[in-house]
Image (cartoon, grey):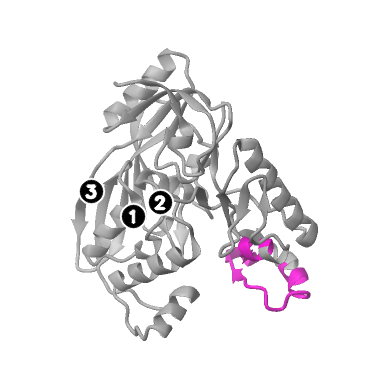
Amino acid sequence: MNIQHNISLSTLTTMRLGGEAAQLVEIHSPDEARQAVLYAQQHGLAWYVLGGGSNTLVHDDGFAGLIILNKIPGFEVIEKSAASASIRVGGGESWDAVVQRTVEMNLSGIECLSAIPGTAGAAPVQNIGAYGQEVSTVITQVDAYDAKNDAFVQLSNADCEFSYRHSIFRGRETGRYIITAVTMKLSTLPPEPPFYKAIENYLGEHAIAAPTVQQLRDVVIAIRANKLPDPRTTPNTGSFFKNAIVPRETYERILASYPDMPHYDMLGGSVKIPTGWLIEQAGLKGTLHRGMRVHTKNSLVLINESAKSYDDLASARQKIIDTVHRKFGIAIQQEPLEINS
C-alpha cells in the first residue's frame, strides 16, 4: 500500500475547508480495503472512508487517523430479463458516470439521480434521492468489507435499513463497513408518469409528451444546473440541510399561516416540508454570514464564498438552524457527514 502523509482534506472535499489527514491511502479492490483497515488497526489509527468528498465536512484540526479513499472500479450486468436488468458497480465509481451508462443502456430507475456528485459507494450511505427517485428503491445488494468481523459480506436491501437520507452506514453501524460494490435492479421498460413536479413543468414547457430515460436525464441535468452551483467551481456540499419531516399537527399549524406552503405527504401520516422554503421564509435566502452564503436560487445550499475555517461554517449553520426554529418551531438537520479527530 502507498501510504501518504499530511494530506490536506480541504482539497478532497467540496466545501474546501478543514485541516490535514495524518495518513491517506487509495484502495482499488476489496482486498486493499481489508489491508487498509488492518494497517489502521495495527498502528492504532482511526479510519474513515472518503469517496468524492461532496457530502463531507472537515474540522479545522483535520483527522489524526487514516483516510481510506475508495477508488474501487467495476461495472457489469449480472442478470437481464425482458423487464429488468441487474448491474453491479464498484464502490469507487463516479455515481453520475454510472447513471450515464445505465441511461445509455435504456435502463430506468436512477435517471433522475443524474448529476449528483460523489461515488457509487456513497449512494447507499446517504440513500441519495432527487426528483422523485431514491436509490434505496433499486438497490438489491451491497457488498462490503466488515471491519468488525474481518469478513466480506453481502447485505440485502433490508439489512441496510434505508430511510430518508439514512442507512445503517451513517447510523448505528457507522465505521463498520467499507462498501466495495452496489447491485441495482433497473427497469428495461420506458419511464412512466407521474413525474416530479419540476420535471412535469419542464416537460410541459418543452412539449415532451413521452420522455425517454435520456430525455429525463437531460431534464434533470438542466434543472440542477439552474438551481445548484457546481462544486468543482463553487465550494459547496449540495443540499446542506435535510428536508423537514414533521407530524401532521405541525404541518397544519404552519399551514394556517402559510396556505400556499409546499409539502409532500409521507407514509405514516407525517409530512415533508422543503427546508429550502423554511429558510427562505425565515428571511435568510442570499444572506452572508462569516463567509458562508445561502444560495440565492436554492436556500438548501450553503456556498463557501470566503470562509476560512470550520468555525465559520458552524456559526453560519447555527444561525440558520436557530432562525428557522424561532420562526417555525422546527429543528432542521444537517445533511453532510463530518470528519473529526
Q: Is residue 90 placed above or below 209 in the rendered structure? A: above
In the figure, residue 80 lies in which quadrant? bottom left
What is the distance, in whole Å, between disc 3 and disc 1 at their CAs? Answer: 13 Å
In the figure, residue 43 lies in which quadrant? top left
Q: Is residue 217 placed above or below 39 in the rendered structure? A: below
Q: Position of residue 109 (x, y in %)?
A: 34, 64
Q: Position of residue 54 (x, y in %)?
A: 46, 46
Q: Amino acid at mark 1?
A: Asp
Q: Residue at x 42, y 19 (%)?
A: 40
Disc 3 secondary structure class: strand
Q: Is residue 23 visible?
A: yes
Q: Are marks 2 and 1 in contact (CB under 8 Å)?
A: yes
Mark 2 and mark 3 lie on one chain; the one further toward the N terminus is 3
Mark 2 and mark 1 lie on one chain; the one further toward the N terminus is 1
Counting other residues with Cα less than 10 Å from the Cα at mark 1, is it few (<14), some (14-19), or many (20 or more)?
some
Q: Amino acid at mark 3?
A: Phe
Front one among 266 and 306: 306
Q: Are marks 3 and 1 in contact (CB under 8 Å)?
A: no
Q: Which residue is mark 2?
A: 117
Q: Residue at x 42, y 36 (%)?
A: 50
Q: Is residue 202 placed above or below 35 in the rendered structure? A: below
Q: Which residue is mark 1?
A: 96
What is the distance, in whole Å, between disc 2 and disc 1 at their CAs? Answer: 7 Å
Identify the mark at residue 54; answer none if there is no mark: none
Front one among 37 and 279: 279
Identify the mark at residue 75; answer none if there is no mark: 3
Residue extent of the magenta highlight: 251-279
Q: Amino acid at mark 2?
A: Pro
